[in-house]
Amino acid sequence: MNEEEARFLDLKRQSAVAASALVGPGMVVGLGTGSTAALVVEELGRRMREEGLRFVGIPTSEATETLARQQRIELAGFATHQHIDLTIDGADEVERGSLFLIKGLGGALLREKIVAAASERMVIVADDRKVVDHLGDHTPVPVEVVPFGWENTARRLEKLGAEVEARRTRDGQLFVTDGGNLILDCRFGQIADPAGLEHHIGDIVGVIESGLFIGYAAEAIIAGKDGVFRLHRER
């Protein structure tokens, strides 16, 4: 790791520390997926060991569940906890002002959205490369689909104007999510109406969920070259 990478990792860690400070005793917390969200889980583990913090976590992916267990975080599910006080998660793009998001490059978008929808508050941790004026500037929209007939689902997504590519593993196999589904990465370019696009994608038979997160995030804690700053959703 070179000096610049080390400095950037330190900034991401600072944003993770700031986000984890929002977790109080007795909370039910959604634990997000991704590199910065993983730093949050590690910081929460440290607070448990050193400060005696006690809370319950609901992980958004198997990878996060594994990390949380390593940190000895108490985990639960929706059978016992229907309400989540706070979810801290990462994002692949964060639209300035609206805090609309693209998520799912890590493959956990369905579980992430289920957790986000059950949360009283959602806070995003990310680096400033993820902040954009319009969604779709740099990132495709991941769409989780059922395996049966996925080729036809892809064609329907193309009719919405997307360049569609089935996500694959390094060895060329179709990527399979924790839920046993596939992901189609859809490049729409700059998205003028994210809410409308989310609706149209959801109307396609075979689509389970999209990586467009509209109206979930209330705040974003961003690591930038000049330090950590916060963005709030404009009303």
Image (tube, helix red, strand yellow):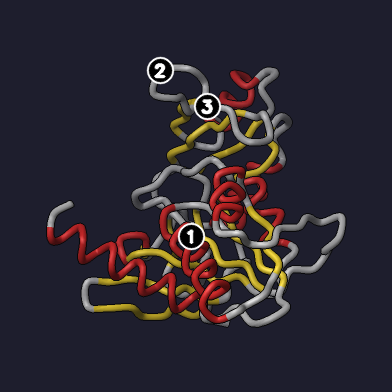
* Other residues around mark 1 within 10 Å, as few (<14) / some (14–19) / many (≥20): many
Query: Residue 196, percent across and down?
Result: 61, 54
Which residue in the structure is indicated by mark 1?
37
Which residue in the structure is indicated by mark 3?
175
Q: Is residue 190 above or below residue 215?
A: above
Mark 2 or 1, nearer chain start: 1
Q: In this view, does 213 lie above or below 149?
A: below
Q: Are marks 2 and 1 in contact (CB under 8 Å)?
A: no
Say left or right for 56 vs 192: right
| SS class, disc 2 | loop
Determine the image quadrant of residue 85: bottom right
Residue drawn at 47 percent across, 29 percent down: 164
Query: Residue 103, percent across and down?
Result: 51, 51
* Other residues around mark 2 within 10 Å, as few (<14) / some (14–19) / many (≥20): few
Say left or right for 57 vs 6: right
The tally of labels here is 3
Say left or right for 142 vs 14: right
Residue that lies at the very extreme toward the left in this rendered image = 3
In this view of the protein, which residue sits in the foreground, 44 or 93?
A: 44
Kind of residue sitting beneath label 3: Phe
Kind of residue sitting beneath label 2: Asp
Q: Quadrant of the C terminus?
A: bottom right
| SS class, disc 3 | loop
Residue that lies at the very extreme toward the right in this rendered image = 79
Label 2 to label 3: alpha-carbon separation: 10 Å
Label 2 to label 1: alpha-carbon separation: 27 Å
